[in-house]
Amino acid sequence: MSLDAQAAKLLEMTANSNAPALGEGTVAESRAGFATLTEMVGVKAPAPKSVTEVRIPGPGGAIRTLVITPDTQPTGPRPILIYYHGGGWVIG
């Protein structure tokens, strides 16, 4: 089975980005490399209307949570996305 063309292109861009491998280099270098790669891919997240930090009580202490409100406000109930991302916990 061959690799998906978009996945192959992303791997090529990653190799050519001069970003340090995950776990190598400083956090600042990793974040800069990630920013360069997302710019190369053409990914740009829309700016939110607001970002509010909320602390939710948990068994091991408060859990830091970000409530990101989109620029456009739908009427009625809004969806929720809970996203747990490890990713090395260092680049964004």
Image (cartoon, helix red, strand yellow):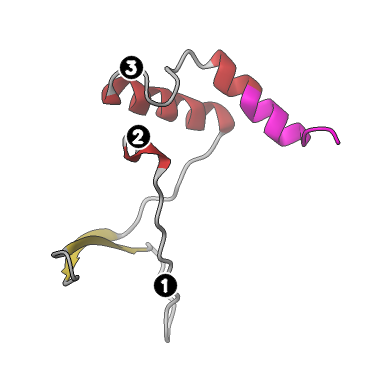
Q: Secondary structure at mark 3?
A: loop
> For residue 9, what is the image quadrant?
top right
Looking at marks 2 and 1 on the same chain, the residue that comes earlier in the sequence is marked by 1
Taking the image as shown, residue 26 lies to the left or right of residue 62, namely right
Residue 7 x %, y %: 69, 34
Looking at marks 2 and 3 on the same chain, the residue that comes earlier in the sequence is marked by 3
Q: Residues within 10 Å of mark 2 (few under 14, many from 20)?
A: some
Q: Main secondary structure of the magenta part?
A: helix
> Looking at the picture, which amino acid does disc 2 mark?
Ile
If the image is split into quadrants, where does the C terminus sit? top left
Is residue 20 covered in magenta?
no
Q: Which label sits on residue 80?
A: 1
If the image is split into quadrants, where does the N terminus sit? top right
Task: Judge whether 10 appears above or below 50 on screen.
Answer: above
Looking at marks 3 and 1 on the same chain, the residue that comes earlier in the sequence is marked by 3
Q: Of 31 and 63, which appears nearest the observer?
A: 63
Tell me, yes or no, whether the two marked residues, 3 and 1, touch with CB atoms within 8 Å.
Answer: no
**What residue is shown with label 2?**
91
**Point 36% across, 24% down: residue:** 30
Marks 2 and 1, Cα distance to the nearest angstrom? Answer: 24 Å
> Looking at the picture, which amino acid does disc 3 mark?
Gly
Q: What span is in magenta?
A: 1-11
Q: Secondary structure at mark 1?
A: loop
**What residue is shown with label 3?**
25
Taking the image as shown, residue 9 lies to the left or right of residue 1, namely left
Q: Secondary structure at mark 2?
A: loop
3 or 1: mark nearer the eye: 3
